[in-house]
Image (cartoon, helix red, strand yellow):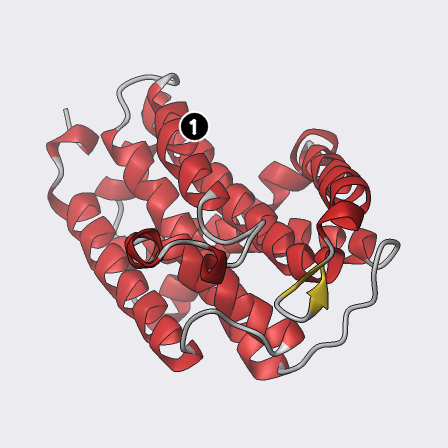
């Protein structure tokens, strides 16, 4: 394929993915915003007023960055896993795989589609959060970088889940039993400085911890872990996950009858 043809193929996949979730925006964009709004009210206002300050900030200020990242993670992941498995279930993915389109373009197209939904929901949640607290961005480069890398990472995770899924039930197993616990235990609602030393070290094996704390640093200037180290860990995870996803697209028998 010529570079122009590759670009057209990539653009086609991305536009299709964006149109897919925008066409049913009432189901894809509105529910996460409502859910996060409830978190703001319950954890930020009602419970937060009793907890007091955390990390030198009001509890609402502390928890908002984590909730924004939670929405980005969940929606980036769910968009790709549902879209790719739907194409796999309908045998549409075989048409892409046997076409001259390089597998890395297929991967990039689906991932950018997931990134678009994750960023769209993240932006909407951020706008809603302004009704509850003020956000003063401490570092715009760090904030933008970590949001983009996070959306990419969990979009790749959604694609890997879709490749291995054998039924629609399988695409809900990882979000329910892996992603949700990691998110809740990833420092969204608390600082790991509150944990005993042993559990604080165990928490450092949680990838969501690096994502949440790096974003919190970008917004508030506060992080429980070294930001440079966290960004490095996220980059490594993106590269490893992307390489594995590309390998599965190329060789996995699950995509070929």
Report whether 48 appears left or right of 130: left
**Extreme residue toward the right, this view:** 131
Q: How far across and how far down the image is residue 97, in percent?
A: 25, 42
Residue 255 or 150: which is nearer the viewer?
A: 150
Query: Which quadrant is home to the N terminus?
Result: bottom left
Identify the residue under disc 1: 176
216 relative to 83, above or below: below
173 relative to 160, above or below: above
149 relative to 205, above or below: below
**Extreme residue toward the front, this view:** 196
Q: Residue at x 29, y 59 (%)?
A: 201
Query: Which quadrant is home to the C terminus?
Result: top left
Q: Residue at x 43, y 65 (%)?
A: 7
Q: How far across and how far down the image is residue 193, in percent?
A: 47, 62
Q: How far across and how far down the image is residue 226, in percent?
A: 40, 77
Residue 67 or 243: which is nearer the viewer?
A: 67
Q: Residues within 10 Å of mark 1 (few under 14, many from 20)?
A: few
State the SS at label 1.
helix
Residue 160 or 20: which is nearer the viewer?
A: 160
Q: How far across and how far down the image is residue 249, in percent?
A: 21, 45
Residue 85 or 210: which is nearer the viewer?
A: 210
Is residue 102 something that shows in the picture? no
Q: Which image quadrant for residue 175?
A: top left
Q: Residue at x 85, y 54 (%)?
A: 132
Q: Residue at x 71, y 32 (%)?
A: 31
Question: What count of labels does the image hold?
Answer: 1
Is residue 215 something that shows in the picture? yes
């Amino acid at each position: 394929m010529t570079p122009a043809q590759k670009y057209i193929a990539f653009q086609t996949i991305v536009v299709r993915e964006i149109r897919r979730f925008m066409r049913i925006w009432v189901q894809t964009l509105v529910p996460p915003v409502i859910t996060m709004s409830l978190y703001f009210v319950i954890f930020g206002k009602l419970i937060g007023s009793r907890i007091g300050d955390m990390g030198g900030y009001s509890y609402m200020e502390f928890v908002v960055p984590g909730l924004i990242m939670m929405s980005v993670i969940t929606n980036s992941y769910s968009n790709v896993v549902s879209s790719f498995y739907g194409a796999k279930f309908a045998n549409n993915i075989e048409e892409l795989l046997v076409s001259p389109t390089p597998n890395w373009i297929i991967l990039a197209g689906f991932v950018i589609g997931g990134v678009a939904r994750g960023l769209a929901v993240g932006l909407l949640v951020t706008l809603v959060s302004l009704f509850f607290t003020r956000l003063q961005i401490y570092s715009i480069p760090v904030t933008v970088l970590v949001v983009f890398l996070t959306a990419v990472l969990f979009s790749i995770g959604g694609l890997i889940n879709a490749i291995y899924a054998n039924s629609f039930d399988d695409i809900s197993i990882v979000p329910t039993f892996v992603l949700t616990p990691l998110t809740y235990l990833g420092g969204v609602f608390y600082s790991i400085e509150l944990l005993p030393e042993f559990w604080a070290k165990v928490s450092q094996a949680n990838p969501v911890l690096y994502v949440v704390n790096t974003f919190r640093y970008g917004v508030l200037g506060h992080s429980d872990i070294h930001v440079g180290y966290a960004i490095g860990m996220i980059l490594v995870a993106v590269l490893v996950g992307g390489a594995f996803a590309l390998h599965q697209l190329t060789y996995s028998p699950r995509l070929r009858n």
